Image (cartoon, helix red, strand yellow):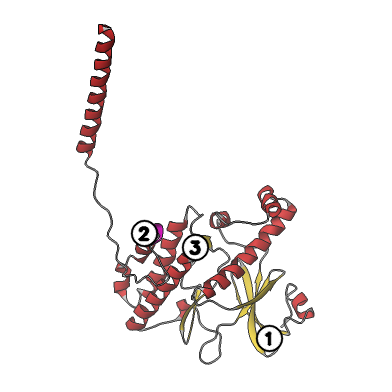
Amino acid sequence: MKVPNRIQPLIEDGLIDEVISRLMSGKEATVYVVRCGDKIRCAKVYKDAAQRSFKNAVQYQEGRKVRNSRRSRAMEKNSKYGREQQETAWHNTEVDALKKLSEAGVRVPETFGCIDGVLLMELITDESGDVAPRLNDVSMSKEQAIEDHLVMMHYIVRMLCTGLIHGDLSEFNVLVDEYGPVIIDLPQVVDAAGNNNAEWMLSRDVDKITEYYARFAPELSKTKYAKEMWALYESGELTPDSQLEGVFVEDDAEANVDSVLAEIQAAIAEEEERLKRIQVANEED
């Protein structure tokens, strides 16, 4: 096929030998199957900011830190240089997240570098060597759904323990090979500690994944993994090996309004009595 303009420099540099086919086009990038020597990989070509249709990008970027102060100031001012740095940061975010999660034991594609907005990655394949299907294209038994759902919950826990939340996790961002689920697409990854929407985004990720597996194992829809793991995370008790049960007891205890009002009134009366004593003491003087 015709070589995309963004990939041409990588061919000239000998990093890619051939573009075999276009694999998919999404809201933030187009992915191609490429040959690198004797290896078949994929090249993710990020779209320019003006072409991306990813909504509320600022909401996802809240809490992300830029170490270089000059770059940070330029990005805040939205200058030309700042916009270029924002694009670079957008690309590098996924590369950094993939490496970090792989080290944490989360199954994600291996990366081989990001050059000028093109990310070279491992091509996830099935046992026949074909491109692995996305989760939304996979049917399974009840037992398999329960098993794979638990695997995904462990992956989300390990992500959270590294300080990250996927932010856009669903059956469309998970591939399935012969060993199970593989998480993909992380340019919008969320800083769990620095983003005010972190808890909500974690719940959305967990709910979307659970809803899909619940098609095959309906009992999964009753689980409350998001609330359980967030409570452990907030209390500092969440670890990569935390054994979750999908159970969370809501604190439904209502405040006793009458008791609270009585305490307030008693405090007011006590203060009034104190002021009277002061007034009487002053008059006697």
Residue at the bottom extreme of this rendering = 128
Residue at the front extreme of this rendering = 285
In this rendering, which labeled residue sits more in front, label 3 or label 1?
3
Dominant secondary structure (helix, strand or loop) of the stretch shown in magenta = helix
Q: Amino acid at mark 2?
A: Ala
The quadrant in which the N terminus is found is bottom right
Horizontal relation, residue 188 to residue 51: left or right: left
Q: Amino acid at mark 1?
A: Arg
| Boundaries of the magenta span | 230-235
For residue 49, say whether it is visible: no
Q: Circle 1 sits in a helix, a strand or a loop, which is it?
A: strand
Which of these two is toward me, 32 or 114? 114
Residue drawn at the location 25% of the way across and 21% of the way down: 274
Residue 15 screen position, x and y as percent: 73, 81
- Does the magenta segment cover residue 232? yes
Residue drawn at the location 41% of the way across and 73% of the way down: 154
Rounded to the nearest angstrom, the CA distance separating label 3 from label 2 is 14 Å
What residue sits right under mark 1 in the picture? 35
Crowding at mark 1 (Cα within 10 Å: few <14, some 14-19, many 20+): some
Going from N to C along the chain, the mark reached first, 3 or 1, is: 1
Q: Which picture quadrant has residue 5?
A: bottom right
Q: Circle 2 sits in a helix, a strand or a loop, which is it?
A: helix
- Does the magenta segment cover residue 33? no
What residue sits right under mark 2 in the picture? 231
Residue drawn at the location 60% of the way across and 65% of the way down: 93
For residue 235, say whether it is visible: yes
Crowding at mark 2 (Cα within 10 Å: few <14, some 14-19, many 20+): some
Depicted 159 relative to depicted 197: above or below:
below
